[in-house]
Image (cartoon, rainbow, N blue to C red):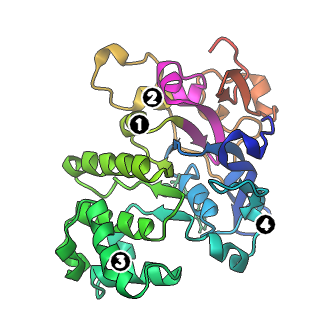
């Protein structure tokens, strides 16, 4: 992948990022040689089957786990300073940046202390970064609740008094409390009723616009990704298969894996149904990935040369990259 300098409007430039879990001869290669950019102000989708390494990428970018190798160059919004490589920072060096990069999880309830009132949950977040002290505290908490569509009086309630959708709103308010530039939303809809999902999607989209946020939206729901995201990164077994603007990806997926994914998703409009064979078999173990192209064991188009190639992403149209030889796709 070409090297893009910090002047190009990228908030994050991820290069050859790796995360291996476990030592010994067969560590789990959760993320293996992953490179992509996250542009300032965009919503970037990250899709792939369960176990493909999506959450690990989200946790690496927020430094909840430490990378095994690679770079995560971060250029703060509105700054001309040289980019910082988040991968190289120690946890204490990363602390001042922790407020800038926040994460929202699938199940906000698991991360909310059941004995804390919501105002204390938000106060704790503000305290961590020395924000909105003293008399400014309560108005800020009220403002946060309103921003996420809750009422000021909700501040006095406990997590169990809220519905799943409301709890996800609290998770979002907590992330926003510290005035982040970048939010990783890791399957934020998966624990919610379908009827509530659209509300949370719309909320995320509105907040992103209002606050000028950059969003990495991790999801296995391809319809929501199509609706919300500007560009999409497709991941398989810890590797990037395809990167493209959303419209281009959905109108003309290039990689056989992306084609299979889009064909497997339920598409209400039969005119858009794709005639691609569904994915056969299970995801191979990331502790023992196939040689060559990691998708070859499930690829309907695999050939002998796929076993030995070191398959790299290549640009097939402006901004559209994929990791397959085939030019006819
Ligand atoms: P996804 O979010 O796409 O489902 P994950 O990033 O959670 O994928 O996981 C990628 C791979 O890494 C999986 O094989 C998973 O079992 C493994 N993995 C994730 N976290 C750990 C961990 N803490 N220890 C060992 N293996 C892990
Ligand atoms: Mg996950």
Q: Are marks 2 and 1 in contact (CB under 8 Å)?
A: yes
Residues at discs 4 and 2 in contact (Cβ within 8 Å): no
Residue 227 in view: yes
Among the two numbered marks 4 and 2 on one chain, the one whose residue lies closer to the N terminus? 4
Q: Tell me: is circle 1 under 8 Å from ligand 1.
A: no
Q: Per the image, is 257 magenta?
A: yes
Which residue is painted at 77% across and 39% down in the image?
4
Q: Is residue 328 above or below residue 226?
A: above
Q: Is mark 2 within 8 Å of ligand 1?
A: no
Q: Earlier in the sequence, mark 4 or mark 3?
A: 4
Residue under circle 2? 262
Q: Which mark is residue 88?
A: 4
Work out how far the residue at label 1 is from the one at label 4, CA to CA, in angstroms.
33 Å
| Image: 265 above or below 187 | above
Mark 2: which secondary structure? helix
**Around disc 1, counting alpha carbons within 10 Å, would you say few (fewer than 14), some (14 to 19), or many (20 or more)?**
many
Q: Could you tell me which quadrant the N terminus lies in?
A: top right
Observer-side mark, 3 or 1, equals 3
Q: CA distance from mark 2 to mark 1?
A: 7 Å
Q: Which residue is mark 1?
A: 222
Can residue 113 be seen here?
no
Location of mark 3 (residue): 112
- The answer to whether mark 4 and mark 3 are in CB contact below 8 A is no
Which residue is located at x 79 percent, y 25 percent? 305
């Amino acid at each position: 992948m070409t090297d893009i300098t910090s002047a190009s409007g990228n908030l994050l430039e991820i290069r050859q990022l790796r995360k291996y879990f476990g030592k010994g001869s067969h560590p789990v290669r959760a993320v293996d040689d992953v490179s992509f950019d996250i542009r300032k102000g965009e919503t970037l989708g990250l899709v792939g089957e369960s176990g493909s390494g999506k959450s690990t990428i989200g946790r690496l970018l927020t430094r909840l786990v430490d990378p095994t190798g690679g770079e995560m160059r971060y250029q703060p919004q509105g700054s001309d300073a040289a980019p910082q490589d988040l991968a190289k920072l120690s946890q204490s060096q990363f602390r001042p940046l922790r407020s800038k990069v926040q994460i929202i999880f699938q199940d906000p309830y698991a991360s909310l202390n059941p004995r804390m009132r919501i105002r204390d949950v938000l106060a704790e977040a503000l305290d961590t970064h020395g924000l909105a002290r003293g008399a400014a505290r309560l108005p800020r908490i009220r403002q946060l609740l309103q921003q996420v569509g809750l009422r000021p009086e909700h501040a006095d309630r406990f997590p169990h008094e809220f519905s799943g959708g409301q709890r996800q709103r609290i998770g979002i308010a907590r992330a926003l409390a510290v005035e982040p530039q970048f939010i990783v939303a890791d399957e934020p809809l998966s624990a919610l009723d379908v009827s509530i999902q659209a509300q949370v999607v719309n909320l995320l989209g509105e907040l992103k616009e209002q606050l000028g946020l950059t969003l990495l939206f991790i999801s296995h729901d391809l319809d929501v990704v199509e609706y919300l995201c500007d560009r999409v990164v497709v991941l398989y077994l810890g590797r990037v298969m395809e990167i493209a603007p959303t419209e281009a990806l959905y109108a003309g997926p290039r990689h056989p894996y992306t084609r299979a994914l889009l064909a497997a998703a339920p598409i209400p409009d039969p005119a858009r149904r794709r005639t691609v064979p569904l994915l056969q078999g299970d995801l191979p173990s990331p502790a023992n990935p196939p040689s060559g192209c990691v998708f070859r064991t499930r690829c309907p188009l695999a050939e002998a040369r796929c076993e030995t190639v070191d398959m790299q992403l290549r640009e097939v149209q402006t901004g559209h990259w994929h990791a397959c030889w085939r030019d006819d796709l």
